[in-house]
Image: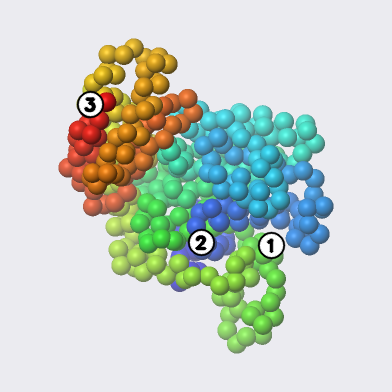
Amino acid sequence: MEDTLLRKMIEMIGWDEGGDGIFNPGGSMSNMYAVNLARYRYCPDIKEVGLFAAKRLVILTSQEGHYSISKGAALLGIGTKNVYIVSSDKRGKMIPSALEEKIKLAKSEGAVPFMVNATAGTTVLGAFDPIEEIADICEKYNLWLHVDACWGGAALMSKKHKHLLKGIHRVNSVAWNLHKMLMVPLQCSAFLVRDKTSLLQHCHSARATYLFQQDKFYDVSYDTGDKSVQCGRKPDAFKFWLMWKALGTTQLEQIVDRAIAMARYLAQEIKKREEFQLVIEPEYSNVCFWYIPPSLRSVPHGPERWKKLHTVAPVVKERMMKKGSMMIGYQAHGDKPNFFRMVVISPQVSREDLNFVLDEIHNLGQDL
């Protein structure tokens, strides 16, 4: 089942020549696999002789990238200071020219950049990095290009929205969480790699003779355990296999299309109400917005307004939780004060539900 799913997902990514992959316990682990695999490709000797076999290695990721890349750098001995942060534009997308500047900076310092982590669907804004342009740069400097599509990978299921990941067929590896937009029960996360040389196997194999005998009577390629850093693994692939069989490709596509359509409905409703303001026009199903209570609507834009607005979302969040009506996250972002982040996923969410969200936030915060 896992093999069947990986083949189908590889086909959807567009790797015509095929590939490899494995299901992992979460997207963070999939991103760490990418770091380890990219390092192994650059310097295979590290597996046996350790970090002494390599120069100072550098990973490049955007300021909107997931923290698991830094965690992976710490876990694998690369070091968090060797994760170079690349600037993003106002929409949260990595700036390709800034990436090239950071690559040149690392080289000028005598370090070796070996991997770029691009993001398809950032955590807060739901932004998609320009994969085509990043791929051009990675090919120019011979860098491994990984795409963290844990959140945005579901767009590949949609003919209408797969353009968001344009160029993904050119990357070396992809992390895709099926337990997010596609709503497979936690946890269900795939790591996919454009490789037919058994790189996963060579990188992680320990050749345990009591498990992975090569003279078994069946096809030993089904013994996938040596591709993994784990020993025991849960059969997470089964959940997605069963769901895909039950719903079919068309219905999975409808889940994605409807979620994005409902997010756009919410954004349009926000624009109609004077008490709300969009932080950014949504690209995916992340809708980020401020609630502006009556007392702040006449306050001019500036530091004083930002300072007061920063205190609004935490109070409204506290009130909604104590009342038990909703749970919607908030956060500050860069120089922007606290705002709400409504992520629309469930196909059960209706327009009435989204109207209720706005009405309830207003009811809970209008006295602030």
Sequence order check, earlier mark of 2 and 1: 2
Closest to the camera, between mark 3 and mark 1, is 3
Is 92 drawn above or below residue 66 in the view shown? above
Residue 51 in percent (x, y) is at 78, 53
- Label 2 packing within 10 angstroms: few (<14), some (14-19), many (20+): some
Q: Which mark is residue 203?
A: 1
Q: Callout 1, which amino acid?
A: Cys
Sequence order check, earlier mark of 2 and 3: 2
Q: The C terminus appears in which quarter of the rendering? A: top left
Residue 25 in percent (x, y) is at 51, 61
Q: Callout 3, which amino acid?
A: Asp
**Residue located 42% across and 42% down the image:** 163
- The residue lying furthest to the front in this view is 322
Q: Callout 2, which amino acid?
A: Pro
Query: Image quarter for residue 97?
Result: top right
Query: Image quarter for residue 191?
Result: bottom right
The answer to whether residue 177 is seen in the rendering is: yes
Per the image, label 2 sits on a secondary structure element best described as: loop
Is 6 drawn above or below residue 344 in the view shown? below
* Mark 2–mark 3 distance (CA, rounded to whole Å): 44 Å
Sequence order check, earlier mark of 3 and 1: 1
- The residue lying furthest to the left in this view is 352
**Residue located 35% across and 24% down the image:** 309
- Label 1 packing within 10 angstroms: few (<14), some (14-19), many (20+): many
Q: How is the image coloured?
A: rainbow
Residue at label 3?
Answer: 367
